Image: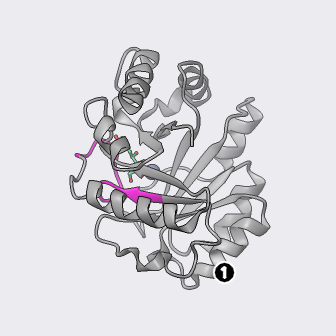
Amino acid sequence: MQPLIAPSILSADFARLGEEVNNVLAAGADVIHFDVMDNHYVPNLTIGPMVCKALRDYGVTAPIDVHLMVKPVDRIVPDFAAAGASIISFHPEASEHVDRTIQTIKEHGCQAGLVFNPATPLHYLDYVMDKIDLILLMSVNPGFGGQKFIPGTLDKLRQVRERIDASGRDIRLEVDGGVNCDNIGEIAQAGADMFVAGSAIFNADDYAEVIRTMKQAINA
Ligand code: DX5
Ligand code: ZN
């Protein structure tokens, strides 16, 4: 599958969010990664469906990849679907009924993803490989941008890549946390095909140069 760069708007200037999103898309981003934190499942508080809808109303047509770091999960899903989310991913430990949550996301017309924290075992995949559209491996503990990539994620990526290939389905393999121009090449080698990057893109002066460098490293 064509590799996708998904800038995390967590590191964008929230006072100029619409402009930031348009700038990063013009710079070559494929997808907008939208981090939702609830100060309960993770120790930080960010943005909700109203902000997603505001981006759609502002004219953003690119896919919006909603990463839910919230507990409970289910009741916010319809709101995000109505607000224009394209993909909705959740952490299985935060849902009482993982299969039901996946079903709810799909019934609302979105693609469904499962997110694994660095220490979350992969067994949550056992009975849902035929239902999910995306697997997101966290390469930092969720809650904050700007953390350091946890190297053990590479091995986990290889394991998930094998499971995806064995399934024969087009499941995206996304990685999130500490991704930058220096490590994105080996992350791609390990099997990822969708790359979230927050601080590496938004802390740079030239978004296009970072995204171009990242794409070159992925394809090298
Ligand atoms: C962390 C978030 C990430 C984060 C990535 O909980 O899910 O999306 O913003 O930011 P960087 O790329 O700075 O690690
Ligand atoms: Zn995220």
Residue at position x 26%, y 46% in the image: 147
Answer above or below: position of 84 versus 207: below
- The location of residue 104, given as percent across then percent down, is 72, 72
Is residue 89 rendered to the left or right of residue 123?
right
- The location of residue 3, given as percent across then percent down, is 51, 38
Residue 137 among magenta residues: yes
Residue 79 among magenta residues: no
The magenta segment is 136-148
Residue at position x 74%, y 50% in the image: 83
Is residue 97 rendered to the left or right of residue 160?
right
Answer above or below: position of 104 versus 54: below
Q: Tell me the kind of residue under disc 1.
A: Arg
Label 1 SS:
helix
Q: Could you tell me which quadrant the N terminus lies in?
A: top right
Answer above or below: position of 153 versus 98: above
Residue at position x 59%, y 63% in the image: 168
Question: For mark 1, does the 10 Å Cα neighbourhood hold few (<14), some (14 to 19), or many (20 or more) residues?
Answer: few
Name the image quarter holding residue 219.
Answer: top left
Name the image quarter holding residue 167.
Answer: bottom right
- The location of residue 49, given as percent across then percent down, is 66, 53
